[in-house]
Image (spheres, rainbow, N blue to C red):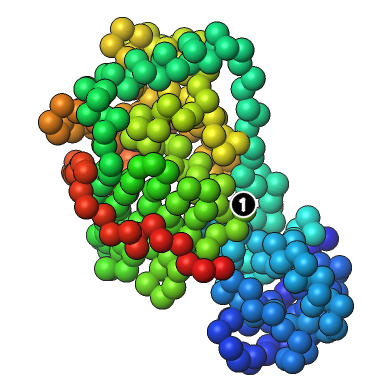
Amino acid sequence: MVLSGFGALLFAMAGGDGQLALKGFDPVELIDGREVAGERALFVDHGPFRYLFVSEDNRDLFLDAPERWGIQWDGACGRMGPLSGMGMPDRFAVWNDRIWVFASDQCRTGFLKAPEKLQPPDDAAPAPDDAAKAAGQALLEKAAAAFGDLAALDALKSIHLHAKLESVSGTTLYEGTRDLWFAFPGRYRFEEAWGGRGYGHAVSGAAAKRFSPEEELPLGAVSTKVALREALQQPLWIARERKNLLAVPAGSDTVEGQPVELVTVHAAQQNVTLAIDAKSGRLVELRHLALTARGYAPLVRRVTGWQTIGKLTLPVRLQSVSAGGLADDSVKGEPQLELDVALDEQLFALPAK
């Protein structure tokens, strides 16, 4: 069942820190197919939102399982994905007995055309025997050795990759930046800034957060899993964390006539396949599922930029491969790489839930 959420009574803010969700409708009733206004005195502040309820029973149901009854993906736009910008809490739809919010009417319409295609899929974990595990790890070691001195690679404590971005809308040119921070073991941060305002997410161990200039919020289970998957899609992360990853051989292929060996790594219920030069082990491509305009689909990203610092030559730029060749991206010039820089611990610190 899908409920529109349009044309309903608007409520004023109920007070407190939470932004009024769902135009004041009780989320339990909404999922059951009824747009029923909650009572101002019966509320729960969960994440960035305030929810109103028609009864204490409904409020208790919500408190027992807020990720079941509350807005999904921690308030991210249902069309744009769990790590996207926030949706509007009064622009919503119910699908699959869950509530989703959207950044625009177009996002809502696009979601409702095929919502099942926008759900992050889980890849089946490989089940290799000991010989296949050893062969997979050997291929990862071959790829890592092509980066340079393995001892220097394994000694890295942090990596910072900075890129300048450009985007054109109509006749207007927008300039921004993208920063990736890696702190080992197990921490990763992604940030984009446009007009001086930075947005992004960070992983610390098995937990994650979303941040904006206004606030930092802990991420729920699905959004955290997607953030962990994004880290696994970074070749710098794979190389440095390789000894902690399950890896299996995945056959062979050619890339523009070049023989490559394939090795698949698995973590956070995601498979990422590396295509490495059959002779040198140098990384050529990454292959994995990604959210596209048509939902989740296979994506190929080719390494197009390298940078040498000391004893290491590391990949700093990847571009998506389309039917016509390399797809355009927003990166301007070559990204800049820094190794073992001092990082502020607040980059990765998680807010209290």
* Residue drawn at point x = 54 percent, y = 29 percent: 266
**Eyeballing the image, is 280 above or below 26?**
above
* Left or right: 90 in relation to 60: left
Q: Residue at x 40, y 33 (%)?
A: 241
Decide: is 135 above or below 243.
above
Whether residue 287 is visible, yes or no, is no
Residue 173: image location, x then y, percent: 25, 60
195 to 160, vertically: above or below: below
In the image, 297: left or right of 211? Answer: right
Type of amino acid under label 1: Val
User: Badge 1 local density, few (<14 within 10 Å), some, or many (20+)?
Assistant: some
- Residue 18 point in image, percent of width and height: 59, 81
Which quarter of the rendered picture does the N terminus lie within? bottom right
Asked which secondary structure carries label 1, the reply is helix
Q: Residue at x 78, y 82 (%)?
A: 53
For the point 85% across and 83% down, the residue is: 55
Residue at the outermost left position? 310
Q: Looking at the picture, how far across and down is residue 47, in whole percent?
A: 59, 71
Classify residue 282 as left or right of residue 353.
left
Say which quadrant the C terminus sits in: bottom right
The residue wearing badge 1 is: 222
Which quadrant of the view contains residue 269? top right
Quadrant of residue 54 in the image?
bottom right
Q: Position of residue 267 (x, y in %)?
A: 54, 34
